Image: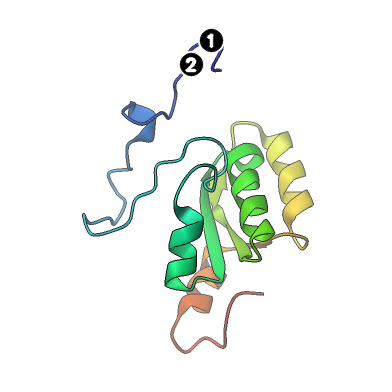
Amino acid sequence: MRDNDIKIAIEGTRGAQLHADLDWNPNDVTIIKKRYSAFFKTELEDLLEEFGVGELVLCGINTHACIRMAAIGAYQRDLRVVLAEECIDSYNEQHARVSLDYMNGKIAKVAVVAEVIEALRPSAAGPAQ
């Protein structure tokens, strides 16, 4: 993509804009990704450590690239990783399925949104398993 000057989700392009329906406010921390992994040359690791985060719920596209790289990056940093099944997608269904099969139960847990929400409730017994 770099050799062909293809810029789909580069800062300042339409593909990098926050979705209009996202519940976001100006006080929220926004991290600009540089590559597939959200950890590559960003302050994400430092912020997670600062906030004492031990578990991440990942959402986004593409399952076989960005989600997979972010999940592996989080796992390598000893974070628990949950993939919100209805909130991840890919333009390549076959690669996405292979990636989910690889990650689920090894470096991440694939969970439906209802499970994620239940695990986040204050009365929940702890992180999603």
Q: In this view, does 27 lie above or below 70?
A: below
Quarter location, residue 84: bottom right
Left or right placement of residue 126 versus residue 92 in this view: left
Residue at horizontal 54 percent and vertical 55 percent from the top: 58
Residue under pointer 2: 6
Left or right placement of residue 44 versus residue 3 in this view: left
Left or right placement of residue 55 versus residue 121 in this view: right
Which x, y percent locates residue 35? 53, 35
Crowd rating for badge 1 (residues with CA inside 10 Å; few <14, some 14–19, many 20+): few
The residue closer to the viewer here, 40 or 101, is: 40
The quarter of the rendered structure image containing the C terminus is bottom right
Left or right placement of residue 50 versus residue 128 in this view: left
Q: What kind of residue is marked 1?
A: Asn
Q: What element carries label 2?
A: loop
The residue closer to the viewer here, 18 or 27, is: 27
The residue closer to the viewer here, 44 or 12, is: 44
Residue at horizontal 21 percent and vertical 54 percent from the top: 26
The residue closer to the viewer here, 108 or 50, is: 50
Colour scheme shown = rainbow
The residue positioned farthest toward the left in the image shown: 26
Disc on res. 58: none
Quarter location, residue 29: bottom left
Residue at horizontal 54 percent and vertical 43 percent from the top: 40
Residue at horizontal 48 percent and vertical 16 percent from the top: 6
Is there a contact, CB below 8 Å, between mark 2 and mark 1? yes
Which x, y percent locates residue 68? 65, 46
Q: What kind of residue is marked 2?
A: Ile
Residue under pointer 1: 4
Q: Is mark 1 on a helix, strand or loop?
A: loop
The residue positioned farthest toward the top in the image shown: 4
The quarter of the rendered structure image containing the N terminus is top right
